[in-house]
Structure formats: structure tokens, C-alpha cells
Amino acid sequence: GAVVSQHPSRVICKSGTSVKIECRSLDFQATTMFWYRQFPKQSLMLMATSNEGSKATYEQGVEKDKFLINHASLTLSTLTVTSAHPEDSSFYICSATRGGTGELFFGEGSRLTVL
Amino acid sequence: AQRVTQPEKLLSVFKGAPVELKCNYSYSGSPELFWYVQYSRQRLQLLLRHISRESIKGFTADLNKGETSFHLKKPFAQEEDSAMYYCALRYNQGGKLIFGQGTELSVKP
């Protein structure tokens, strides 16, 4: 099946620094990628929809200046958490839509811990 | 607004018992409904989609438009079924998925 890979899988940073998380579709081109945030044993909260070559569409309540999303190519989208704070600590998951069936494939997630 | 509701946060059953994980949705059109499963320390993976009407790992789910439900069922639970289960809705192909709160299924020996 199709593979979506995230990097890094874990990151620890100091408060006030910025962290970049990459999401790659390894064997297919993804015109649309989605970024989710997940708290322990809770639902996935959609943060934004990332379209290749255009600005991301953010969900209500998600700060676009805080969570910068770039979708520079058909296989790569990045999420940058700027000026991170402890409350940004979470599990961030990306997913990518493969054309045709529109099936969604998920990355393994990236756990961010802000000290 | 589109919404997916999974009323049970935790469902605990014994091995061999039947299982039903409930999912209700609110959407006025014709959505696509999915069930995703997340095993411990693994990524989210697709279990079922309503349009394929197939059975995966013994699980089935029927879309009931009258009751706006898409409950997940398995006649005989196995210990390896223990995981988080998420019901999700999408209202156009390629569009965003909206997830329910998730139900943790625990199958005891």
C-alpha cells in the first residue's frame, strides 16, 4: 500500500524555538495533504488542509502564523510550529490523499515535546 | 455542520463476545463513512469504508441513512482487536476527514 512518512518521529525543543515537521508521500503524488493534532486517547483534530502550490486552508481556531504549512511539491508538506510553547506539545499527524480512489494514508505521527 | 459522534469512550469485552462500536453522524448530504483503527504505537490505518461493503478482520459496518449511523460490528472479538477505533466522515472525495472522538476497545482473555 501507499506510504506516508513523517520526520522526525519525536522532537524535544525549548520554549520559544521553532520546530519543522516533514510529511512525505513516498510512492505517490499527493496534491492534498492534511495536518492533524492528536491528544492522548482523543480524537484527531484537523488543523489545516495543504494543497500543493497554494496557501493552506486552516480550520477555525488554528493560528496560521503559529502553525506554518508549506506544500512545496507533490510529495512534501511541512508543518512549522513557531515560537513553541509547552501547550503546543502534542502528537502531530499528517495524511495524504492518493488520486483515483481518494483514499487517505496516514503518517506515523510526530511527537512534539516543548520544555 | 458535519459531526461524527462515538458515544463510548471505552468498550471492554471478553474474548469471543460480540462487539458493536457505535457511530452516528450529522450531515445533510451523502457522505462517505469510514472506520479507522489505531493499534498501540502504530499509525492510523483504514479498516472499512462504507462504499466497499467488505468485511475486514471479521468486522462489518452498515450505513443506515435513516438513523444516520455507521456502527462497527464483529461477532466474536479477539484479543488482537484491542485498539482505538475512529469513525470518520468525508463529504467529497479528496476532501477532509472529520473524525469522531474514538472508542478504545479492550478485549480481555
Image (cartoon, coloured by chain):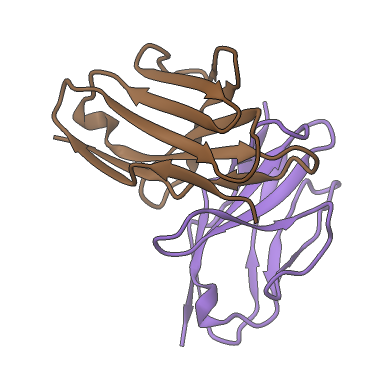
Nearer the observer, A93 or A3: A3
Residue A51 location, x and y as percent? 61, 21
Residue B28 location, x and y as percent? 81, 31
Chain A pictured colour:
brown
* Residue under the image location 52 percent in, 52 percent down: B102
Nearer the observer, B33 or A1: A1
* Residue under the image location 54 percent in, 17 percent down: A56
Q: In which image quadrant can residue A90 be found?
A: top left
Q: Which chain is purple?
A: B
Tell whether B64 sits left or right of B89.
Answer: right
Quadrant including the C terminus of chain A: top left
* Residue under the image location 65 percent in, 43 percent down: A104
Position of A73 relative to A107 (above/below): above
Nearer the observer, A73 or A108: A73
Tell whether A96 sits left or right of B90.
Answer: left
Q: Is residue A107 visible?
A: yes
Q: Is residue B105 visible?
A: no
Q: In which image quadrant can residue B59 be found?
A: bottom right
